[in-house]
Image (spheres, rainbow, N blue to C red):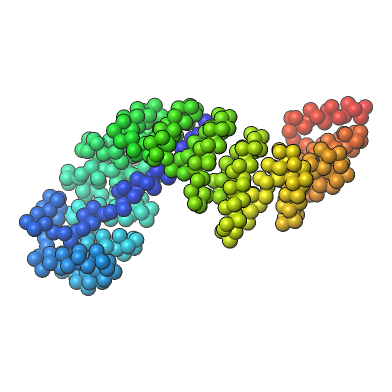
Amino acid sequence: MRSSKRKIRTFLLVVNCVLLLCYVACPVGSRAWAIPEDGGHPHSPAQEPIVSSQEAKLLRQVAQLADTDPEAAIKLLASKVTPQSSAALDLALGNLEFQQGRLEEAEEAYRAALKKFPAFARARMNLAQVLIRQEKLSHVTEVLRPVLISGQAGPEAFTLLGYAFLLQGQLLPAETAYRQALLLKPDDVNTSLGLAKCLLEQERYHEAIRLLEGLVEREPQRSQLWLLLANAYLALEKPRQAIVKLECARRLGIASAEVLATLGDLYLNCRQAAEALAAYKEAFAGDEPPLDRLLRSVQGFLMLRMPAEADSLLRQARKVAQESPSSLSPDQHRKLLRLEAQQAYLSGDRKAALMAYKRLLEEDPLDGDALIALGDLYREADELEEAIIAYERAARISGKEAQALVRQAQVEVERERYARAVELLEAAQAIDPRPNVARYLDQVRELVR
């Protein structure tokens, strides 16, 4: 259950980023210079600054220039902004800076607009978005409060507020804000997604599922909805239902590579090797499959002792590594070698496994796992002296002492050196006492007597 919750929290972080794009990618009134011909405003007149005819002309000029040369548009607009100019110019400048990814400059421009005209609702909304992007979440409520108190706040304001609360882990205020937004705009799927995340974080999985099931009926092409549903079922320890939801996304053609890889993980956990392999192959069919994800999938098959299925993905991982060796990190290189050794061992290719573990040790003589695995290979081949040497080396490595000492003791029992085996087991227990080793020690002591 705990691992399921961790998976949900990791997934929610990803979906949060997706939703942030929905609310933050384009500021409210991003084309602030596009003044309606009739002089009207989309917001209440009390929330909009006055724009002179000369400023309106400038904003139209900036709008045309921004389409081809945004930097020149910013330079032109910035040269015209003065303490006496309309706050609309500061808003437009902030929006241009925002679109160029310069968040600090955008924040400065929006704050300048609010200094001139504190009731400027659009500037407050855009500033809140910038603050969210900058992770200045505690300031969002302060910025939006005047809009909320005015009684003229739209659903977008409550959605932004809910999102900020959610990122801070304040789930009840987040839920309240999202529900308020839905009262004003009940068909907003993004807001419903935010509410669903609040419910999931509060472990109210059944409520989240009911909400999400209704949403997928309305918008089946929204992949986030299927993903959230799958994670809700995982949290309820219902992997079969989670598989069904991810398969829906897959058959609708909206499943990303990561979704397909997750589907492969679920099939693998259910011991459906063929289905898992098919999902993994589809996930990694792109030109540049992520090597880390590939290696993790190989590891999953090997943990279940399925070397044939692992080999198919391992070959692809080798190809990726060979095609872009410069992008291969040392950790990835070592993990690839280790998986190759494990796959060879499980396939019965002792020679290939020995070579792979020796290569690992050439690069890092203090790799305790490789030394223990090498000792196991020697022991299975009845090369007990070689096995002892490998285990003794491993026993000198921090964190591997107890495991290596137990392995040595097992070799000594096989050689009928029971007193030595007792010494080794007692040393292992002194480092890391374990019930199964204690029982084995008692059995060996009986042999000594």
Taking 185 as reference, is 449 left or right? right
The residue at the point 66 percent across, 34 percent down is: 305
Which residue is situated farthest in the bottom direction here? 79
Taking 356 as reference, is 312 left or right? left
Q: Quadrant of residue 296?
A: top right
Where is residue 107 drawn, in percent x and y? 30, 60
The residue at the point 21 percent across, 58 percent down is: 31
How many numbered marks have been drawn onto this rendered protein structure? 0
Q: Quadrant of residue 312?
A: top right
Which of 99 and 314 lies nearest the eye of the viewer? 314
Q: Quadrant of residue 166?
A: top left
The residue at the point 57 percent across, 41 percent down is: 297
Where is residue 78 drawn, in percent x and y? 24, 70
Q: Is residue 89 visible?
A: no
Quarter of the C terminus within the rendering: top right
Taking 201 as reference, is 30 left or right? left
The residue at the point 37 percent across, 56 percent down is: 134
96 vs 376: above or below: below
Where is residue 434 drawn, in percent x and y? 73, 33
Which of 185 and 436 lies nearest the eye of the viewer? 185
Which residue is situated farthest in the left direction here? 38
Q: Is residue 132 visible?
A: yes
Taking 14 as reference, is 77 left or right? left
Where is residue 199 drawn, in percent x and y? 37, 33
